[in-house]
Structures are given as structure tokens and as C-alpha cells.
Amino acid sequence: MNSQELLELKKAACNVRLWTIEGVYNAKSGHPGGSLSAADIITYLYFKEMNVDPKNPKDPGRDRFVLSKGHCCPALYAALALKGFFPTEEIKSLRHIGAMLQGHPDMKHTPGVDMSSGSLGQGVSAACGMALAGKYDGADYRVYALLGDGECEEGQVWEAAMFASHNKLDNLCIIVDLNGLQIDGHVNDVAGLEPLDTKFEAFGFEVIKIDGNDFEQIESALEKAKTVKGKPTAIIAATIKGKGVSYMENQVGWHGKAPNTEEYEQAMAELRAQLKALEA
């Protein structure tokens, strides 16, 4: 990508983070840490990689995205709104009774959401089904599934991985948001995943390891994934939980709680300063 494209992606990611905080603050609950760690990946997918059209969200030829770690939907909602699927003001009603934006993605009520998710481990299975359907239909769309590292402790993830490899789903790209933290603490203390790369390789995946908060590395990995034939791809993306908000970064306590007013104002001030610097 050229320098202008990179700049625009950085600004888009900053806005995704701003609206993520806005949503969680107004909801008075939610999951900011993992939403912020995944913001760059989600931004790249929606603003550079995927073939999606806000004016035709059910286009049969569109690329599909499944947020398997569905609790991190604030970042997905922010990206969808900024892309034009619905007004950004909807984000302020996150998790409110009767609102369109629920605490986990809902494909029946939210434009742009391809799969309802939230029960960890299940989203990647749905993504496998979408990819297999694409194979049967002779379609050229691609399917992307974003998993949490803690989510990879779920057995269903590995059943899905076995299925994907067996069916040679080279139109499927799994991305693991490896931020190292889950609700109960450090992933390695709860149920260590390493060596995660060789696990996916043993299940028949092409594996690419990157810094998931670096757009150029994200681009390189996704471009390589499109060249892989006869097997699925797993991108293991090392990220910083709470990325972009100083007091949230690498702090497990921000896995699943909303900022108070003082914390909200500090987070928004920091993110607005980052955006201003990018726009200078």
C-alpha cells in the first residue's frame, strides 16, 4: 500500500477505537480490551480487503466475516457504521433494550453482520460452513473468521480446523487475535496454547505469524493467504489488548468492563489526540 492508503487506514482505525469506547461507555458494560486489540484487523478487512457493499449487505457474491469472538462486537459495529451500513449514532444505544446493536452480533437485526456469534468456538464452525457452501456453489467469495486466543481453548475450534483442512477450504482465512489475555487472566496461565502455530500446521493449515497492529504486516499476510491453494490459512496476529488507550493496554481488568466518566474522557482525549496527529 502507498503512504496515503496507510494514513487513511490509521485514521479509520482510530475512529473505530473512538466509537468502540463511545459504545461501551454508553452501554455501561461491554468488552473494550479485545475490541481495541482487534480494531486494526477489522479496519483493514472492511476498508481495504473485503468485497462488501453497505447498499447491498446481502449480496450473494460478497466476502463474509464472522466475529467468532462475538463479545468484541463494539469494534465490528464501529467499522460497519463508519463503512456506511448504519448511522454511527446507533452505537450510542449499544446493549440498550430494544436497540439494534446487541451485546453480541445478531445477523437478523444488524445490517452487515453475516453470522450471529458470541458462544465461543462456534463462529469458526459457521465460517467453515460458509466456505464450504462457496466451494459447492463455485463462488469466488472469501470467508474471514476472527478468533480470540482464549477462544482457542474451546474444543470446537479444533473440530472446525479439522473440518476445514479435510475439505481443503482455501477460501477460508482464520485470524487469531493473540493479545495474551482473557477474562480469567493471562492465556498462558489459564490453558497455554503454545506452540499455536504448529498446532494449526498439524491440522493442515498454512500458518502466517504477524504483528496484528501493523497494517503493512496485515496486508502482507492477507495477500499471501489469497495465494494458498488446497488448504485453509491461519494468521496468528500478536496484538496489544486495549491498544490505543494507555491505561487499558495489557490490563486484563479491561477485558469486560466499561469506563466511568473520568476514564471515558481520558480515553476519548487520547484517541482524539492520535487522530489529530494523523490529520496534521
Image (tube, rainbow, N blue to C red):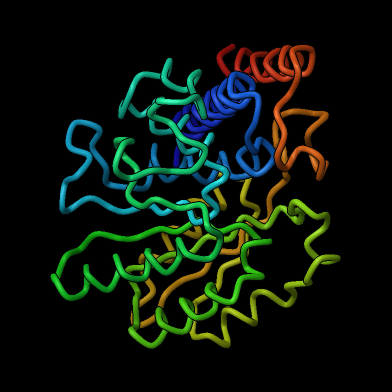
Q: Is residue 196 above or below residue 180?
A: below
Q: In the image, is 137 to the left or to the right of 184?
A: left
Location of the C terminus by quadrant is top right
Of 166 and 94, nearer the camera is 94
* Percent x, y of residue 194: 75, 74
Residue 54's place in the image compared with 236, above or below, is above
Q: Residue furthest right?
A: 189
* Residue in the picture at 60% in, 40% down: 35
x, y (%) of residue 98? 40, 25
Residue 47 % position (x, y):
39, 37
- Residue 5 vs residue 84: left or right? right
For the point 53% across and 29% down, the residue is: 16
Compared with residue 10, is residue 71 higher up or lower down, i.e. above or below?
below
**Going by the image, does 174 lie left or right of 55?**
right
Residue 141 against residue 213 in the figure, above or below: below
* Residue appearing at x 61%, y 71% in the figure: 154
- In this view, the residue in front, 238 or 215, is 238
Number of marks: 0
Indicate the position of residue 182 as horizontal and vertical percent values: 74, 54
Quadrant containing the N terminus in the rendered view: top left
Residue drawn at (65%, 24%), measured in percent from left and top? 28
